[in-house]
Amino acid sequence: MRKLLNTLYVTMPNAYLARDGENVLIKIDNEIRFRIPVHNLEGIVCFGFAGASPGLMHLCCERGVTLSFLTEYGKFKGRVTGKVSGNILLRKNQYRWTENEIITLRMATRFISAKIMNSRAVLHRAVRDHPQVVDTTLLTDTMKNLASLAKQLQKVKDLHTLRGVEGQAAYLYFSAFNQLILSQKEDFSMSERNRRPPLDRINCLLSFLYTLLTHEVVAALESIGLDPQAGFLHRDRPGRPSLALDVMEELRPHFADRLAATLINRNQINANGFVVKENGAVIMDEKTRKEVLVAWQKRKQEEIIHPFLEEKVPLGLVPYIQAMLLARHVRGDIEDYPPFFWK
Amino acid sequence: MEKRHLEEDYLLLSGIQHMAFCERQWALIHIEQAWAENARTMEGKYLHERADNPFENETRKDVRVVRAMPVVSKKLGLRGVADIVEFYRTGDVLEEVTVRLKNRKGWWRPCPVEYKRGRPKRDDRDAVQLCAQAMALEEMLGVKIEFGFLYYAQTKRRVEIAINQQLRTRVEELSSKMHQMFADGKTPKAQKGKHCSLCSLKEICQPSLTIRHRSVKEYLAQMVDLEVKDY
């Protein structure tokens, strides 16, 4: 499998990125603070206002390193990439497929079944690991309901109904989500999923993790030659990485939701790391963001057995593997898309 | 083989070495546009830096060394850059193999030299690239080229390659296969073998997955624990 390279996250707002030969430099007040050879990097993500020299951008384009700019709260602003790459024939087929109702429904069903089953697996893990602490009845019921929704999904005839089933599943899952929080329960609880703005700390944390995941999936799709904007389940909307959001569905529970719970349960982050505005909107502070980024990078190194390839791979490669399998399917190498199931 | 290709249909001459090595590797690079740099390809890049400078030409007595010479063959439909073309001065005209050079006295005999990292290979992928360059030069200069050299960085030796009929036929076959595959736009399945371990695109290619993979339908059924409906 492709080597898992690192993403460099730049969180200091006064950082400036520059190039020295084959190296990426991070300067603060004109002083070199960090230096890394570009071939060790897959992407650079700048939070807040981090400047970058044209020379560095040139290097990134040449080496296929994605350089992204996010606001300090993780909202995506833009990205520097090289030329449009990959196989136009593959992309055209992707566009044709996204216009085809039957194929669109099949693909959407794949993403969402995996999402529902993976959400169910997250709850299952909580029951298995902490049967004394969690409300097993609630969780077992939710798991049952999720399984039956996954079953319903197979009979769905149109996208509208499918979205309805997905909505129900998400509602059930997030209603039970508080059960995963074993410590700091008073400070961390959620009543529903909300994001614009997030109204509690868990939602704030989840939104941030989803942003990180989006970045990875977009990069994976692009590097495999698929257009991250042309999705199946998510409708086209300028600027929205619909296909990335589609693929993310199956990855969210394990990649983001579980990590969020772990960070809280291990007391790696705490209530003080969040600012609650007068209107209830919640924002994460810089120290907490850093803590989350470190945990994210660490999680990507964890090894799992990929359920379809049956090969041991680091978790960070899963978005690339799914992008590759998706491209294989669009190209006709394999007869269907095997989404990622976490067991 | 009197076919002439249109300029817009030209393919990269250097691709012929990939084609000779593995059809799928060629397709991944030239059709899929997937390119994974590995240590080996990077080395090659540095090695080429000097040979690639088109302004660093030199003449030593009776040898003129021209670097980075753009070459094209309309017959093969290939274009590229020859690392080095050496011209040897001969006092007299030699039938078919010498040319005049602008502002220089005498007759000159062209000979392509291709730089390679590593050592000589068991297969003919380096030789076919050199031969394709020679065939392009023949078309452009109106001469016959009977030999060329492959220079190997690791052994620091030149190997003389005879541009014979057998090699020329192989080049013609490979280039017409390239054009045919490019027109079809299809990437062939992998032919898994020993050569896969040397390939910089192994991660992208996933040879074992293209040859045989699990049934996705069974996988889905097993994972969702439900019957998967056919559409």
Image (cartoon, coloured by chain):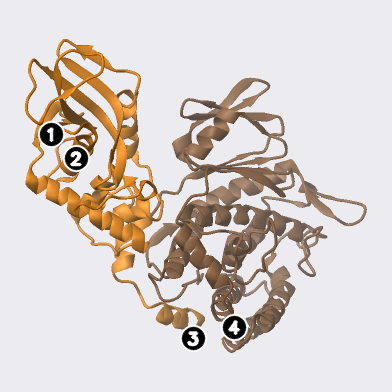
The residue singled out by tag 3 in the image is B228
> Cβ–Cβ below 8 Å for labels 2 and 1?
yes
Where is A308 relative to B97, above or below?
below
Taking depth in this image into account, of B132 and A62 the one nearest to the observer is: B132
Where is B189 relative to A37, above or below?
below
Where is A145 relative to A326, above or below?
below
Q: Position of residue A283 (x, y in %)?
A: 80, 50
Near mark 1 (Cα within 10 A), the count class, few <14, some 14-19 or many ≥20, is: many
The residue singled out by tag 4 in the image is A150
The answer to which of marks 2 and 1 sits earlier in the sequence is 2
Relative horizontal placement of residue A269, taking residue A9 as reference (left or right): right
> Cβ–Cβ below 8 Å for labels 3 and 1?
no
The residue singled out by tag 2 in the image is B135
The answer to which of marks 3 and 2 sits earlier in the sequence is 2
Q: Position of residue B111 (x, y in %)?
A: 16, 28
Taking depth in this image into account, of A35 and B102 the one nearest to the observer is: B102
Q: Which chain does the numbered disc 2 sit on?
A: B
Image colour for chain B is orange
- Mark 4 vs mark 1, foreground winner is 1
Q: Amino acid at mark 4?
A: Ala
Q: Position of residue B191 (x, y in %)?
A: 23, 62
Q: Amino acid at mark 2?
A: Met
Taking depth in this image into account, of A86 and B36 the one nearest to the observer is: A86
Task: Give the quarter of the image for residue B146.
Answer: top left
How far apart marks 4 and 1 lie (CA) works out to 69 Å
The answer to which of marks 3 and 1 sits earlier in the sequence is 1
The chain assigned the colour brown in the figure is A
The residue at 50%/54% (across/down) is: A316
